[in-house]
Image (cartoon, rainbow, N blue to C red):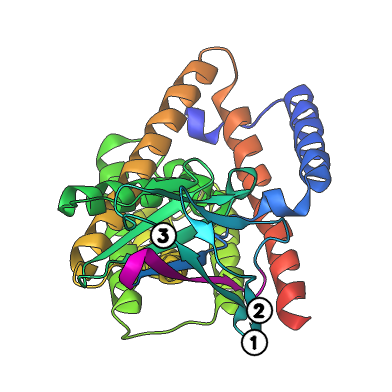
C-alpha cells in the first residue's frame, strides 16, 4: 500500500486530536489584533513654504490603531497647536512648523509606530515642486528627506513593503501553505501552482491599483478566509477514488483564488499610496516584494517539512496540517462574517 493511502494508527490519531485541540486553544487565546494583518496606514503630508516654513497635514484613517502616534520632523519647531478635523474617512490634524534650511536631509517619522503593525506614507513636497514619498512601518518608523533621490529609493521602499505585507498576512501565507500540501511538495506541479497564484494576484493587484476595479474590504476579507477553507476542505478529501478537477489541475484553483488575494494586496497598497509619476514602477516593486516574501515562506516550509518528516510520520503530519488549516480558516470565516454582519 502506498504512503498516500496509509492511515495513521489509532495512537497517532489520538495524538493528532490532541495537537489540533491544543492548537485551537492557543489560537483562541491569541489577542485579536495579532490575528489580523491589515496595514493601518496614515498619511503625513509636509509642504515646504517660503522662509523656512512648512505646512503639515497628518491624516489617520477610521479604524486605525488607537495607540498614540505623533509625527515629528527633526530640527523643526511647531508654530502653533494642531487643528483637528473629523470625517467619515478618519481624523486629520493640520498645523505649521518652522524648519530653517528647508526639509532636505531631515529625519521625518512617527513616534509610536514601532509599537504597532501599522504603516504610513510620508509625502514631502519641496518648495521647488519636487515630491518625495516613502512608506514607513513598524520596522523602520522614520525616513530621511533626501537632497537627491532616484528610482532605487522607490524600489527599495516598495519591495520592502511588499515583503512585509505578505509575511505579516497569515491568511495569504496559509493559502500558499495549503497549495504546497495540495501538490504534495512535488517540484514540477509546485512551480506551476505557485506561478498561477502569482499571475492571478498580479492581475487583480494591478487592475485595482490603476482604478479599474474596486472591492469592499470586509466582504473581501471574508472571501479570502473562505478560499483558505475551501482549499483545506479539498485537502481532507484525500486521494482515494477518482481525482477531482482541483487535484488534477491544482494550478486552476491557485490562479482563480490568486485573483481574489490580489484584491487583498491592492487594498493594503491603496491605503499606503503610490508615488506620483512612479506608479507603474512602485507597483512593480511592491509585486516583486510580495513574490520575494512568498518564495522565502515556501523555502522555509519545505525546509521545516523535510526535517520533521525524518522524525514524524508523514501521514500524521499531513492530516494534522490539513485539519489545523481548516480549523483556522473556519475561525476566520466566523470572525469576518460576524464583522460583516455587525
Q: Please name the predominant secondary structure of the magenta segment in the image.
A: strand
Q: Which residue is mark 1?
A: 88
Kindly indicate the quadrant of the structure image that contains residue 324.
Answer: top right
**How far across and how far down the image is residue 240, in percent?**
52, 47
Q: Please identify the quadrant where the C terminus is shown.
A: bottom right
Query: Any mark on residue 120, and which?
Result: none
Mark 1 or 2: the one toward you:
2
Evaluate if marks 3 and 2 touch, with contact meaning CB atoms under 8 Å apart: no
Task: Choose the circle earlier in sequence order: 3 or 1.
Answer: 1
Q: Nearer the viewer, residue 330 or 31?
A: 31
Check residue 55 for magenta coloring: yes
Cα–Cα gap, marks 1 and 2: 14 Å
In the image, which residues are magenta? 50-63
In the displayed structure image, the side of residue 101 where residue 300 appears, left or right: right
**How far across and how far down the image is residue 36, in percent?**
64, 56
Q: Residue at x 26, y 70 (%)?
A: 127
Task: Choose the circle earlier in sequence order: 3 or 2.
Answer: 2
Vertical placement of 3 versus 95: above or below? above
Q: Which secondary structure, mark 2?
A: strand
Residue 249 visible, this angle: no
Evaluate if marks 1 and 2 touch, with contact meaning CB atoms under 8 Å apart: no
Cα–Cα gap, marks 3 and 2: 53 Å
Residue 206 visible, this angle: yes
In the displayed structure image, the side of residue 26 where residue 297 appears, left or right: left
Q: Which residue is mark 2?
A: 84
Q: Which residue is mark 3?
A: 246
Amino acid at each position: 500500500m502506498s504512503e498516500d493511502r496509509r492511515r495513521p494508527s489509532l495512537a497517532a490519531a489520538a495524538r493528532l486530536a490532541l495537537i489540533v485541540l491544543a492548537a485551537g486553544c492557543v489560537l483562541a487565546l491569541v489577542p485579536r489584533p495579532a490575528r489580523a494583518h491589515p496595514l493601518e496606514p496614515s498619511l503625513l503630508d509636509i509642504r515646504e513654504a517660503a522662509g523656512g516654513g512648512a505646512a503639515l497635514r497628518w491624516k489617520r484613517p477610521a479604524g486605525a490603531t488607537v495607540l498614540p502616534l505623533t509625527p515629528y520632523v527633526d530640527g523643526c519647531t511647531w508654530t502653533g497647536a494642531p487643528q483637528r478635523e473629523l470625517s467619515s474617512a478618519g481624523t486629520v490634524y493640520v498645523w505649521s512648523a518652522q524648519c530653517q534650511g528647508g526639509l532636505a536631509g531631515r529625519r521625518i517619522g512617527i513616534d509610536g509606530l514601532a509599537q504597532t503593525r501599522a504603516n504610513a506614507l510620508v509625502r514631502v513636497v519641496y518648495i521647488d515642486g519636487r515630491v518625495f514619498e516613502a512608506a514607513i512601518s513598524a520596522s523602520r518608523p522614520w525616513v530621511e528627506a533626501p537632497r537627491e533621490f532616484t528610482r532605487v529609493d522607490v524600489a527599495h521602499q516598495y519591495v520592502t513593503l511588499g515583503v512585509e505585507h505578505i509575511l505579516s498576512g497569515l491568511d495569504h501565507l496559509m493559502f500558499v501553505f495549503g497549495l504546497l500540501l495540495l501538490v504534495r511538495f512535488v517540484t514540477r506541479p509546485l512551480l506551476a501552482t505557485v506561478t498561477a497564484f502569482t499571475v492571478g494576484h498580479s492581475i487583480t493587484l494591478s487592475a485595482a491599483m490603476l482604478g479599474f476595479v474596486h472591492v469592499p474590504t470586509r466582504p473581501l476579507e471574508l472571501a479570502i478566509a473562505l478560499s483558505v477553507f475551501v482549499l483545506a476542505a479539498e485537502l481532507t478529501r484525500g486521494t482515494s477514488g477518482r481525482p477531482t478537477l482541483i487535484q488534477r489541475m491544482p494550478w486552476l484553483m491557485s490562479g482563480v483564488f490568486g485573483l481574489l488575494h490580489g484584491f487583498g494586496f491592492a487594498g493594503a497598497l491603496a491605503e499606503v499610496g503610490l508615488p506620483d509619476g512612479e506608479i507603474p514602477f512602485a507597483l512593480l516593486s511592491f509585486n516583486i516584494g510580495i513574490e520575494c516574501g512568498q518564495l522565502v515562506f515556501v523555502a522555509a516550509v519545505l525546509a521545516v517539512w523535510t526535517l520533521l518528516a525524518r522524525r514524524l510520520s508523514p501521514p500524521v503530519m499531513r492530516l494534522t496540517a490539513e485539519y489545523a488549516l481548516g480549523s483556522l480558516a473556519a475561525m476566520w470565516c466566523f470572525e469576518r462574517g460576524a464583522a460583516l454582519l455587525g
